[in-house]
Image (cartoon, rainbow, N blue to C red):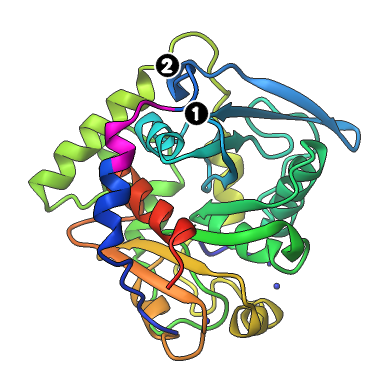
């Protein structure tokens, strides 16, 4: 995600153990009665502001940092429930001043990383799997420079690495992301418009997200967000040499899940670092876009569970 004001490689096959993990997750019920679509919104006082969060499932804590213009209600419930079925306590939240949270709103990924760290501390979580999608993935990378001791695994979805990139984003993203969106925009932004299967997955995901009844987080104002986005692709969308240095030296396992046609964060930019990031594993879905975990919610959760729980 390119913003105007911003700071190991091998392709790891997740292994045949994925089949067993997927089967176990589908064979057993979710570990908490609450489904994501019904999960109550909770609030916790943090540094003079209230952060809104929801929790589904029990087990190893996983904190999710959402995307540009995203709120607590923009995660596919099936993805969250599938993670819970794999034995995770899945915690979603709204950044300061956005959605249900109070405080000063920002699109700075370091401010978002601080929100995640403050929430983890307030909930007294000793260690978490930190997952970030899109701009939230940049925030998750920034978190490695703020509270690495709290992160056991880093899962990045549809995001960009630090530094200059060999493949630029597409101008179409900037057009669609800067306006009030309809369903066709969702297909363009997060799926693969030229694939009938991806379009069908987009409709199914849209309907699951819309199924929540009752309280829904206020949308992030699109005009305010567009002012911070810029209007064209950047050759260096995440100019953060210190973060790149951390990625090159960290021992924390990193998984990136991407689509083969991501308008804003081309997955090719991660493969370009394939011999430089020693803990990086890459999973790329075919005929998919910027939201692969919504196109493939169950298998994405199973891959994540394998990545976290299976050590070679």
Circle on res. 212:
2
Residue 119, given in percent of the width and then of the height, sits at 75, 40
Magenta-tinted stretch: 24-30
Q: Is residue 107 magenta?
A: no
In-image side of 301 versus 67 (left or right): left
In-image side of 268 versus 161 (left or right): left
Q: Residue at x 74, y 23 (%)?
A: 43
Name the residue carrying label 1.
Answer: 73
Whether residue 241 is visible: yes
* Element type at mark 1: loop
Local packing at callout 1 (Cα closer than 10 Å; few below 14, some 14-19, many 20+) is: many
Which callout, 1 or 2, points at the residue further toward the start of the chain?
Answer: 1
Local packing at callout 2 (Cα closer than 10 Å; few below 14, some 14-19, many 20+) is: some
Considering only vertical position in the picture, is 48 above or below 22?
Answer: above
* Element type at mark 2: loop
Residue 71, given in percent of the width and then of the height, sits at 55, 34
Considering only vertical position in the picture, is 73 above or below 109?
Answer: above
Badge 1 vs badge 2, beta-carbon distance below 8 Å:
yes
| Quadrant into which the C terminus falls | bottom left
Q: Residue at x 42, y 77 (%)?
A: 270
Considering only vertical position in the picture, is 254 above or below 41?
Answer: below
Q: Is residue 25 magenta?
A: yes
Q: Residue at x 38, y 68 (%)?
A: 169
In-image side of 227 versus 147 (left or right): left
């Amino acid at each position: 995600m390119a913003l105007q004001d911003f700071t190991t490689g091998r392709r790891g096959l997740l292994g045949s153990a994925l089949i067993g993990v997927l089967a176990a997750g589908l064979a057993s019920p979710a570990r908490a009665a609450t489904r994501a679509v019904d999960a109550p919104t909770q609030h916790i006082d943090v540094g003079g502001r209230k952060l809104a969060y929801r929790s589904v499932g029990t087990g190893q804590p996983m904190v999710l940092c959402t995307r540009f213009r995203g709120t607590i209600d923009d995660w596919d419930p099936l993805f969250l429930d599938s993670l819970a079925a794999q034995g995770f306590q899945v915690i979603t939240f709204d950044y300061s001043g956005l959605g249900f949270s109070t405080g000063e709103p920002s699109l700075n990924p370091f401010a978002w990383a601080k929100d995640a760290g403050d929430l983890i501390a307030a909930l007294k979580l000793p260690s978490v799997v930190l997952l970030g999608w899109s701009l939230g993935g940049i925030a998750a990378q920034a978190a490695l420079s703020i509270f690495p001791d709290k992160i056991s695994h880093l899962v990045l979805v549809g995001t960009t690495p630090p530094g200059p990139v060999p493949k630029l984003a597409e101008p179409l993203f900037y057009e669609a992301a800067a306006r009030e969106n309809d369903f066709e925009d969702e297909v363009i932004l997060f799926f693969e418009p030229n694939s009938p299967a991806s379009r069908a997955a987009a409709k199914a995901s849209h309907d699951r997200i819309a199924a929540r009844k009752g309280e829904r987080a206020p949308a992030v104002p699109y005009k305010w967000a567009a002012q911070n986005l810029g209007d064209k692709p950047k050759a260096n969308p995440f100019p953060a040499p210190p973060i790149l240095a951390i990625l090159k030296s960290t021992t924390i396992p990193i998984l990136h899940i991407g689509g083969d046609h991501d308008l804003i964060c081309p997955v090719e930019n991660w493969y370009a670092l394939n011999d430089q990031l020693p803990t990086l594993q890459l999973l790329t879905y075919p005929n998919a876009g910027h939201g692969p975990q919504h196109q493939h919610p169950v298998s994405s959760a199973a891959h994540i569970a394998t990545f976290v729980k299976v050590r070679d």
